[in-house]
Image (cartoon, rainbow, N blue to C red):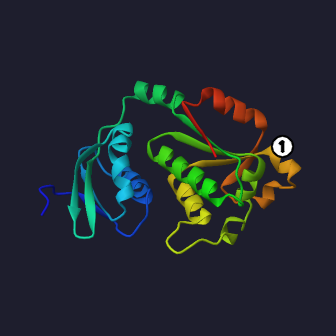
Amino acid sequence: MSKFRPDHVLDCRSVIYPVPILRAEQALASMSPGQVLEVQATDANVKPDLATWAARVNNEILAVEDSDGGFSFFVRKGRAAAPADAIAKEERSLFLVVLRSGLNAPGQVRAALMYASIACAMDQDTVVYCVQEGADVMVKGAPEKEQTKPGVPTIAQRLAEAIEIGVRLEVCEQTADTRGIKAEDLIAEAKLIGGASLIDYAIRSRGQLTF
């Protein structure tokens, strides 16, 4: 039995990485500073990210305890940053993921969306900016056409995770025009935006990934 007495328990068993971290972030948002959240999980891929994630969002990992068939991690919610710190943080927290791979490279697409979700869970204002074949991923119904092996997350799942955690999805207007994609063709969460925005993001972002 754990020595910690959590204020809230979150069951993420049988849920694949990085969803336990994403759901922990959401649960902590409704908790008070100093309260403890226990997250029950089974995917060991979660463990390497815990310390980095918690430090980034001003929380504390108290312990990671193994149990039969899984483990639990206990995280204490930290106090919110002071207003001045929050403003400075907002100015330097843009994270850019450029998606140029399309449905013919599903592994790249899934990876882009997964890392974008992780960045967002680490309190970064995260944008997935789609160019070239990446624009096709944001077309209504397109991700659902992918076929994967059992147990492998789909593009549709990774996209849903990114949307749920708050990743911004943007499609280059110039790319959309050349590929015959209109605004009404896109999923509701994606929007068309000009190519100059990508340059602005690249200049301002504190981190960038390209897939």
Give the residue number, with chain letter if any, for mark 1.
Answer: 174
Could you tell me residue 6's position as x and y percent?
Answer: 21, 57
Could you tell me residue 179's position as x and y percent?
Answer: 85, 53
The amino acid sitting under disc 1 is Gln
Q: Is residue 174 left or right of residue 39?
A: right
Q: Residue at x 71, y 35 (%)?
A: 198
Q: Residue at x 33, y 65 (%)?
A: 42
Q: Residue at x 38, y 43 (%)?
A: 53
Could you tell me residue 21's position as x and y percent?
Answer: 40, 54
- From what the image shows, is residue 33 above or below residue 12? above
Q: Is residue 123 left or right of residue 43?
A: right
Q: Residues within 10 Å of mark 1 (few under 14, many from 20)?
A: some
Frontmost residue, 207 versus 10: 207
Could you tell me residue 147's position as x and y percent?
Answer: 64, 72
Evaluate whether residue 37 shows in this view: no
Secondary structure of the residue carrying numbered label 1: helix
Q: Is residue 206 left or right of residue 83?
A: right
- From what the image shows, is residue 183 above or below residue 97? below
Number of callouts: 1
Quarter holding residue 202: top right
Evaluate whether residue 195 shows in this view: yes
In the picture, which quadrant includes the N terminus?
Answer: bottom left
Q: Residue at x 72, y 50 (%)?
A: 191
Q: Is residue 79 left or right of residue 168?
A: left
Frontmost residue, 28 versus 16: 16
- Residue furthest bottom in the image: 150
